Amino acid sequence: MSRCVVVLLCALFEGATAQPFNADWLAKPVEPSKQCTKEDLKDIKAWMIDLDGCMYIPGSLVHGAQKFYHWLRDTKKSYVFLSNTAFKGPIGVQAKFKKREYLMEPEVPIDHVWTAGQALGLFLKENATDGSYIWLIQRTAKYKIGKDTIYDSCYNQVKLTAGQEKFSKWQVRTFFPREEEFHDWLKKANDYIKASPDAPQKFFFALCTEKPEDRHSDDPSFSSIQKIEYRPDGYMGWSNTVLDMMIRFVKNGATFINTAPDQLEPEKKAPDGVTMHTGSIGPWTAWIKDAIYPKGWKRPDKGGKLTASMGYGGCHRNMTGADKLKLEQVAMVGDNIASDHTGGNLLGVKTVLVLSGVHSVEDTKFFCKENRPTCWLKDVGEIPKILGGQQKSTYLRPQAGAAAGVKPPAGAEPEQIVAEGVSEEDPCA
């Protein structure tokens, strides 16, 4: 794992959605798939595990999640849960696993969780010089700890991870109540980039959510977590004004950070089988990149699992003994090829696609070969089975409308699936 930082920092990935490809190969037959075998996973001693779509979906745990968690603990494997959610930290993840519908026992330790909010804080700590200007578009996470209601946000995670001393030397805003103040930021950014184009970065814009719906107090001396202003009705939402502001800030010199490259969020299927995915940050990232091209197109930076901050934070800080392992002894498990497997491949570890969330095996042919998973499984519950010698060649899909982790009605016959294949054609070649 000692090479993980070098691997990530040297990798230049502009996002799976931005990769050009020739669509002619789509009509070609799909080659046989590669389902994970014991041989693929037998040497893995440390596991980096996605959460949304991998351990849970809206409304329930994924089938096999509890079994997989117990197996990790019982076999004393090194592990860390990675979340591309930038507006909550480890306590928020722990609190979610305490809810009835997501109950995970025993309690998930907070030192086994690393989120995109923490990764953003680490990135800014390492890259934002004193006096930097940082604009965060964010939302608030709200959850219960005992009888207490706790609020968290991207703002808080940046502050907690970077540290008060470093944070206090930045100008951080979550909104601009006065147009004049924002224009002043634009002028300063423009002057700075013109006067010293090769100087350290000083202006940053981070997209922490695809659904902005709250803000902090406009008091620059804001410090208390409990003072977050919770606004479910939205402090500005998406509007032409906000979109124009984002474009102008980046084109005038700010570095844009997308905290997650995901195109979609895991779905909770409708009773009639209608697909109910919702968009994530990835499409907004692609829109901003397209809007600023060619001026400023080099300034967008990677986010979430595609960063050294996420990979390094996950593999070194939160997995005991992982720094002594070789890369081939580490695996990334997730449901989203654009983030989980692209990030794992940049890190140089094995990647396992689970079919409980966003992407299917068939979807792999739409991604460049270097972004595809090593192999696939039905869900995380298959990992203990395989490493215990109980491997199955077929799997079952719940009836339409049944969420993962929920048994089909009595007497209902689950649909048998013919394994789909991973194409050997490369759309990016």
Image (cartoon, rainbow, N blue to C red):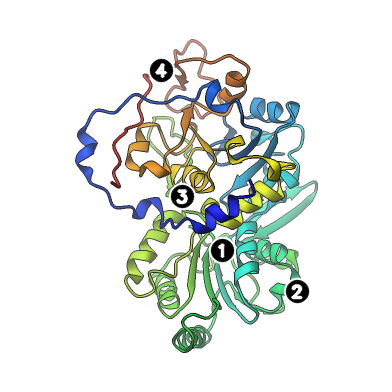
Tag 3: amino acid: Asp
- Give, as a three-letter code, the residue at label 4: Glu
Tag 4's secondary structure?
strand
Q: Nearer the viewer's eye, disc 2 or disc 3?
A: 2
Q: Which residue is mark 2?
A: 165
Res 138 label: 1
* Cβ–Cβ under 8 Å for marks 4 and 1: no
The residue depicted at 45 percent of the width and 37 percent of the height is 373
Q: Closer to the camera: disc 1 or disc 2?
A: 2
| Mark found first going from the N terminus, 1 or 3 | 1
The first of marks 1 and 2 along the sequence is 1
At label 3, counting other C-alpha atoms closer than 10 Å, the crowd grade (few under 14, some 14-19, many 20 or more) is many
- Name the residue: 32% across, 32% down: 423
Give the residue number, with chain letter if any, for mark 4: 415
Work out whether mark 4 precedes mark 2 in sequence or the reverse, and give the earlier one. Answer: 2
Q: Who comes first in sequence, dot 2 or dot 3?
A: 2
Q: Which residue does the numbered mark 3 point to in the structure image? A: 262
Front residue of 413/364: it is 364
Q: Secondary structure at mark 3?
A: loop
**Sooner in the amino-acid sequence: mark 3 or mark 4:** 3
Q: Amino acid at mark 2?
A: Glu
Decide if residue 276 is in sight here: yes
Task: Determine the CA span between mark 4 and mark 2.
Answer: 57 Å
Q: Quadrant of residue 299?
A: bottom left
